[in-house]
Structures are given as C-alpha cells and as structure tokens.
Amino acid sequence: MIDLRSDTVTKPTREMLETMLRAEVGDDVFGEDPTVNAFQKRVASMFGMQAGLFVPSGVMSNQLGLKVLTEPGDEILIEEKGHIYNYETGGAAFLSGIQIKPLKGINGKLELAYLENQVKGKFDWEAKTKVICVENSTNKGGGACYSKDELAAIKYFADQHNLFVHLDGARIWNAMTATEIEPGFFGEVADTISVCFSKGLGAPIGSMLLSNEENIAKARRFRKMWGGGMRQIGLIAAAAEYALDNHWDLMKDDHRRAKEFAKAISSNSAFSIDMDSVETNIVLFDTLNEDAITVISRFEDHGIRLVPFGANTIRATFHFQVGDEDLEKVTTGINQIT
Ligand SMILES: Cc1ncc(COP(=O)(O)O)c(C=O)c1O
C-alpha cells in the first residue's frame, strides 16, 4: 500500500534509530536532559525566540500556547478550517476556559477583511478577544502558505488591537520550503509558535512550543499538570533533531510530487481540482460522480490509501517515504479510476 493519508505515517529510519541510541539523556522533569535542553535552545534561537519546550504532540503545544496567552472568559480568533477549532477535541474550552470565534478566510488563511470588527471586550458582557491564531501551512485549507506581507499585516492588526498572535506551525517546515521565508521572521510576527517534528519531517513523536522565557516557564508547569512531563526525553529529541537535519531538505521533492499527483488528478474527468491551491505537500480534490468514501475504496483497490476530507473531498499528503516510483504507481492508478 502507498500511504498518502497523512505525513504523520512515516516510520523512523535506521539512521534515526541509531542516532537515538547515541543520545545523551537525563531526567527532563529535573531539567537534566542535555539533548533536549540543547535542542530547545537551538530551535528557539532559529526562530528568534527566547525559549522552547519539547512536548509530545502538536495539540499539546497549541493548547499550551493558548493557555499562556489567555485567561478564562477570553476569546480567540481563527480561520474556520483551523486545526485548533476542528481537531483538538474542544480543548481550548476545556483546558483554558476560552471560546473560539471561527472566521471566514481563504484556504484556511485568515483575511484582514474578515478580522475587522471582530475584536471585542470593551463592554462587561463581551468575551475579551486575546489571540489571533494563524496556521502555516494550513491542513484543512489544503497546504496553503501565508506570504510575508499577509503575516506582517496580521501582526500589525494584532498590535493595533493589543492582541497576541499564536502560530500553529505544525507544517512550518513545508511553508518555509515553499515560500523561502526565513524562520526568524515568524518569531517577529508571533508571540507563541508551535512546530511539529512528527509531520513531514518524519520524527515518531515531538512538537515544540516557542516563546519568551516567561511564557515557556508557565507552559512548563502546565505541561507537567497535563501529564506531559517526560523523563529521558533526549531519546525522542534526538530523533526530532535528526529529522530536522536530514529530512527538511527532502520536502521540496514532496511538493513536486504533490503537484505531479494533482496534475494526474486534473486529467481525470471523475475529479475536479484547483491546481493553484497546491502549494506544498497536501492536495485536496473533489469527486464528481461518487462520494469520497466510495472513491477512496477504488483507490485502495489500486494500492493507494487516501482520507476523506468532506462528503466529496479527498486529501492526499506527500512525505519522504513516498518516492518517485510510488508516484508512478499512483498516477497509473489514477488513470484507471473512472
Ligand atoms: C495544523 C496542525 N496543527 C496541529 C496538529 C496536531 O498535531 P498532533 O497530531 O501532533 O497533536 C496537526 C496534526 O495533524 C495539524 O495538522
């Protein structure tokens, strides 16, 4: 089976496992794991942030980001396709006591026009708007990336209204590959950043929250409270660092393959696709004759796994463990589906 369901399905490579075996470790609840300590420092400074906190998942780093930026009763603004709104089990309400205001946008990206007039909190009876959440690249939005200008405009709007910016950068590595925006810029436009090593980079576990020292110290306490304090964490930090050093470069090929896949889809009259929407490793396309689940089972007959992303929408996601030979098999399969 060629697994295009997600970029989270990659398996650790032998070299990654060997790197893990060599990692120097200690008890991170005591702050004594040298590998994770160095890695947190390295990633934080890469993004121009003061500090980082290694956590098990992107959901945890997003939720910790919101926790340190808000108080119960606050509101956060997010595009309606945002992961924090759609796929985090209502965590923001449960863990931080905040409400989420989903806004219209394009391909999962916030638009200034829809942000205008959304900031509340002047009156006693209103929730206080505190954070703008941006996702880069977008997941449910089909892998779209913000431009520098778009992010700078959102940051300007946030500053004008005294709001924080949280960046869900689960796939920031893909976004940086596609847009060539340097990591330090994201540290300038966001107060908290969540980055994941377990998506297209291919680490088995691991995300990191980046922010100033005060926020990270606060997040560290909540990580412990939420059961995320880990011990000899250097083992997985070593895998994440290996992934960053060795797999980031491979993303440009994932993006090329995603475009080639999209081209094959566009040449089959059973599907419709917006070719311009394919910017990174994620491809969304619509089925025209049958529902997504039925079409996915036809793909499975050809050895290709995909996920439904709506009644008539399918998502394909590329990662470094799907190579050019696999892509050839996939395009042959696409041509045989009617
Ligand atoms: C944009 C985005 N944010 C956050 C997450 C959550 O990551 P995790 O599955 O590691 O909790 C995902 C997962 O796919 C994601 O796509």
Image (spheres, rainbow, N blue to C red):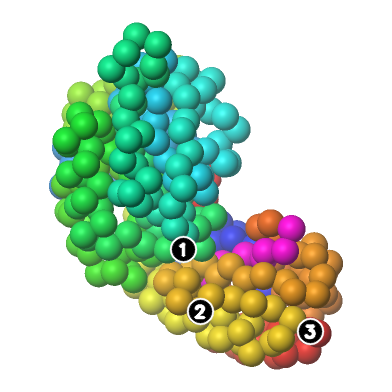
- The answer to whether 202 appears left or right of 326 in the picture is left
Badge number at residue 337? 3
Q: Earlier in the sequence, mark 2 or mark 1?
A: 1
Amino acid type, residue under disc 3 in the picture: Ile
Q: Nearer the viewer, residue 26 or 97?
A: 97
Q: Which residue is at a point 61% across and 84% down the rendered structure image?
A: 266
Residue under label 1, please give it.
143
Report crowding for label 2: few under 14, some 14 to 19, many 20 or more residues within 10 A (C-alpha).
Answer: some
Q: Residue at x 55, y 36 (%)?
A: 88
On-image quarter of the C terminus: bottom right
Residue at the spot of label 2: 275
Label 2, label 1: how far apart the Cα atoms are: 12 Å
Asked whether the residues under the numbered discs 3 and 1 touch, taking CB atoms below 8 Å apart as contact, a structural biologist would say: no
* Mark found first going from the N terminus, 3 or 1: 1
Q: CA distance from mark 3 to mark 1?
A: 25 Å
Of the two numbered discs 3 and 2 in the rendering, the one whose residue sits closer to the viewer = 2
Closer to the camera in the image, 248 or 115:
115
- Asked if the residue at label 2 sits under 8 Å from ligand 1, the reply is no
292, above or below 270, in the image: above
Per the rendered image, the range of residues in magenta is 311-320
